[in-house]
Image (cartoon, grey):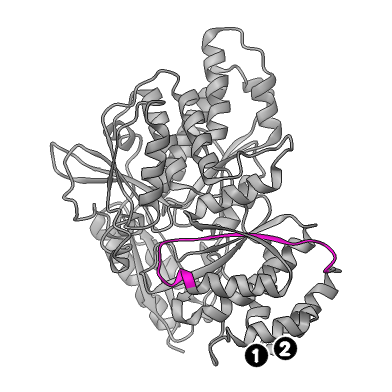
Amino acid sequence: MATHAKIVEASKKHPIVDGHVYQYGTAGFRMKADLLEGVAFRVGLLASLRSRKMDGQAIGVMVTASHNPAVDNGVKIVDPMGEMLEQDWEKLATDLVNSPTHEQLADNYTKIADTYRITSKTPAKVIYGRDTRPSGHKLIGALVDALVATDTEYVDYKILTTPQLHYLVRATNTEGTDLSYGEVSEAGYYKKLVDALARAMKGRKINGSLTVDCANGVGGPKLWEFIKHVQGKVPIDIKVVNDDVLRPEVLNLDCGADFVKTRQRAPPNPKPVPGARSCSFDGDADRLIYYWLDPETNSFSMLDGDRIASLAASFIVDLIRAADLEESGIKVGVVQTAYANGASTTYITDHLQLPVVCTPTGVKHLHHAALSFDVGVYFEANGHGTVLFSREALKTFQSKKPQSPAQKDALDTLIALSDLINQTVGDALSDALLVEVILAHKGWTLRDWAMTYADLPNKLVRVEVKNKDLFQTTDAERKLSHPEGAQEAIDSEVKKYKNARAFARASGTENACRVYAEAATRSEANELAEKIAFVVQRFGAS
């Protein structure tokens, strides 16, 4: 049977929901799980085309809804080097998934193949994984039916964190080359982290224990696996909490990185211990937030993506100086979004004297901008981020002849960090190990880290509007270009407050706008956020 006919027949088992418009965004397709079966099938079709377009390289598909509630799920595509799907193909994904009939779906599949000169003679390979959501089983079944219909080779890695799937895609496509990213297995992922951690620590001691809240998601069992691999090799004391994956209803419930960031407090269970070093992953373990309760004042301190970015950038610059590489022209830069706290941007530009680039929200934008530096540090404030090292930077680290033991230690540490950091995507486990290494090297507590600068008080507000598409932005989402007059109204309110900044942007997933406000005091930040929310309501009423 020809591929066209196979697609039509297989598609009938997995129809899309009539009347629902699907949109491929930063997180792929993400929504209520009962809307996604037909989407998963159609994503499988596109993944097979993408693999053939990339000369048979493996393409990844991850089934997850990250920090969303358990009733949601999502499907997203991972490109050959573990990066997000190429932007031009996001539109192809949207168009293909919204094909109204089974016949038109097969026609659109053929049309993409013809447009991109993709031939069925080229082999295709797709590797996939899912998080712990019960709905993942059915979505994977639909995905596999599409791969079978298109004669695509596939590998099922079953339950994984999102960063592990990204790792496996890159490892698969670089296996046996001088760019090899690691062994092509889940065990290979742990082995790479443990080896890099041992080299980065080099006998230094991590003081105390780290309590890790796993959001009752896939990060729990995977963190236990890592602990098995690291035991006896590197002394690190990790206490795992919120790792219940047997009750789907508790996934991301009152715990996890998103809870800590949005509520600005520790998860209620287990009860936070004053002075303990703690961090939270999100449901698919690609976001990381650190925090602690001051034992003297019992006040809560959050160390989010902005803090991790400044800590990493500061440490890497110190190592480059210690390795006597300042004359080598290695450019270190930090990439943030409009949500980054203004105090962190000032600290990085004025104290660290590093360039900061601001991009629109969405990891794909930050990742792309980070590639313009030899060492590009990027983090969203929500804790999703990583560090990218260019091939030229790595060659410089490896070829530099150390003139002293201190120089050798700095060079060895830089090389170890490039292996410890998951450069394909933000990885909560990898990033937590990075933070632990830096704190150990500096001999810092979380109090020391928190005192590097004082965050400006800020407030994030969600505002429902009639039509979010009325709100269009410019200047990396920091200003509104439409509706006309809205930005002027925002500017007028901001001028009334000291050290103030505010912006509004349309949500990517719901008919609402997000308002962010900063000011010198907590009450002023809250007040400014309310005033900007009122501006948005006024201009969004039409």
Residue 439, visible in the rendered structure: yes
Q: Is residue 302 rendered to the left or right of residue 495?
A: left
User: Could you tell me which residue is drawn at 60 percent across and 16 percent down?
Assistant: 324
Mark 2 neighbour class, 10 Å CA radius: few under 14, some 14 to 19, many 20 or more: some
Circle 1 sits in a helix, a strand or a loop, which is it?
loop
User: Could you tell me which residue is drawn at 64 percent across and 47 percent down?
Assistant: 170
Percent position (x, y) of residue 472?
55, 73
The reply to whether the C-beta atoms of the residues labelled 1 and 2 are less than 8 Å apart is yes
- Between 25 and 216, the one lying in front of the other is 216
Up-down: is 151 above or below 370? below
Identify residue type, mark 2: Gln
Residue 481, visible in the rendered structure: no
Q: Name the residue under label 1.
A: 100
Q: Is residue 96 rendered to the left or right of residue 246?
A: right
For the record, the magenta segment spans 120-137
Up-down: is 135 above or below 255? below
Per the image, is 133 magenta?
yes
Q: Name the residue under label 2.
A: 104
Circle 2 sits in a helix, a strand or a loop, which is it?
helix
Q: Is residue 19 rendered to the left or right of residue 231?
A: right
User: Could you tell me which residue is drawn at 56 percent across and 69 percent down?
Assistant: 25
